[in-house]
Image (cartoon, rainbow, N blue to C red):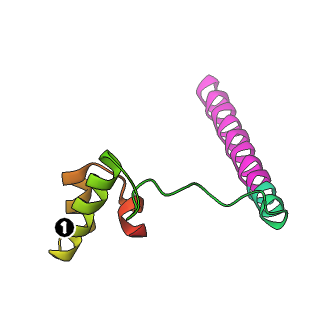
């Protein structure tokens, strides 16, 4: 009997946590949409790009070189150490 109660309590808590996460995501999306309409949100700035300087430029050049060699995004990620998303943006 105690196990049954514990399972239901756990399910209830997991459900509450999931609902709260969903509420936060929805509020965040709505906030970003409003900020974009007001011109206050433009997303993050690119770190690795053609006009970058220093270490960021070296990393950018290496990513471009590897992609021109037809390396997979995953291989580039493993070698260079930047996120897959940052590579796909190039």
Quadrant of res 52: bottom left
Q: Which residue appears at 55% of the width and 55% of the height? A: 45
SS majority, magenta: helix
Quadrant of res 59: bottom left
**Left or right placement of residue 68 versus residue 26 in this view:** left
Q: Name the residue under label 1.
A: 66
- Residue 11 lies, with reference to residue 47, above or below; the image says above
Q: Is mark 1 on a helix, strand or loop?
A: helix
Please tell me whether residue 4 belongs to the stretch shown in magenta.
yes
Q: Which residue appears at 78% of the width and 57% of the height? A: 40
Residue with the most extreme top position: 2
Q: Residue 17 appears at what percent x and percent y?
A: 69, 39
Please tell me whether residue 24 belongs to the stretch shown in magenta.
yes
Q: Residue 2 appears at what percent x and percent y?
A: 63, 23
Q: Residues within 10 Å of mark 1 (few under 14, many from 20)?
A: some
Q: Give the range drawn in magenta.
A: 1-28
Q: Residue 89 appears at what percent x and percent y?
A: 43, 68
Is 58 or 2 nearer to us in this picture?
Answer: 58
């Amino acid at each position: 009997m105690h196990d049954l109660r514990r399972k239901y309590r756990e399910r209830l808590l997991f459900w509450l946590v999931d609902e709260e996460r969903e509420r936060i995501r929805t509020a965040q999306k709505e906030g970003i949409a409003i900020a974009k309409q007001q011109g206050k949100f433009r997303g993050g700035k690119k770190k690795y790009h053609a006009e970058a300087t220093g270490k960021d430029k070296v990393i950018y050049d290496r990513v471009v070189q590897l992609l021109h060699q037809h390396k997979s995004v995953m291989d580039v990620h493993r070698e260079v150490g930047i996120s897959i998303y940052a590579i796909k943006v190039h």
